[in-house]
Image (spheres, rainbow, N blue to C red):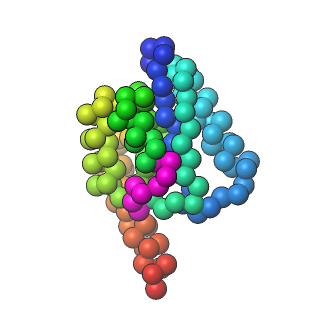
Amino acid sequence: MIENNKTAAVYIRFAHYNDDELLLEHQRTTLRDFAEKQGFDDIREYIDNGYSGSNLDRPAFMQMETDIKAGEVDAVIVRDISRIARNFLLVESWLGGLEAYNVKFIAADGSHEQPDVTSGFRKWFSEWAATEQLNAVNQ
C-alpha cells in the first residue's frame, strides 16, 4: 500500500482507434479502482487512442513523461506492460528512466512485478507480433 498524497498516472493505449465508449470506460474504471486500492488519492489519466506500441511518440504518453520529469507523478499504472510499448528493449529502457525520477511502475496484471518462467517468451512474442503487424501493413 502506498502512503497518502501520492499521484498515480493511469496510462491507457489502444493501438487502433476505439470509439467503443464502454470498452474505454471499463479500462478507465478498472485502473482507477486498482490505483485507489493501492492507496493513491490523486489519479491522473493519460489516454492514447489509436496509437501503435511500436514507439513512444504519442501525445498523452509524452505529456505523462513531462509530468514525471516535473515531479508530479509517483507511479505509472497500466493494464499490462504492453500498453507502454511492444518492443521489450524500448520498455526496459523507459522503465530504467523512471528510476531516475523515483517513479514506481505497476502493471495491474502483475506481468512486470512478478516475472515467471514464461515472461521472457511473452516479451519475445509481443515483439514478434508487433514486427509481423508492421510488416503486414507495409506490404
Confirm whether the magenta stretch covers residue 87: no
Q: Position of residue 93 (x, y in %)?
A: 27, 48
Count of numbered badges drawn on the protein: 0
Percent of width and height locating residue 117: 33, 46
Q: Is 13 rendered above or below residue 51?
A: above
Point 48% across, 62% down: residue:
52
The residue under the point 49% across, 34% down is 9
The answer to whether one can see residue 47 in this image is yes
Q: Quadrant of residue 45?
A: top right
Residue 6 location, x and y as percent?
46, 20
In the image, what residue occupies the spot 35% across and 41% down?
115
- Is residue 105 among the parts visible in the rendering? no
Front residue of this view, candidates 111 and 38: 38
Q: In the figure, is residue 75 to the left or right of 48?
A: left
Stretch in magenta: 54-61
Q: Is residue 25 above or below residue 134?
A: above
Tell me if residue 14 comes above or below residue 9 in the rendering. below
* 41 left or right, relative to 103: right
Horizontally, is 47 left or right of 72 in the view? right
Q: Is residue 58 magenta?
A: yes
Instruction: Choose between 117 and 96: the one closer to the eye.
Output: 96
Q: Is residue 5 above or below residue 108?
A: above
| Residue at the extreme top of the image, as rendered | 4
Which residue is rendered at x = 63% and y = 43% of the image? 27
Q: Position of residue 54 (x, y in %)?
A: 41, 62
Instruction: Identify the main secondary structure in magenta.
Output: loop
* Residue positioned most to the bottom: 139
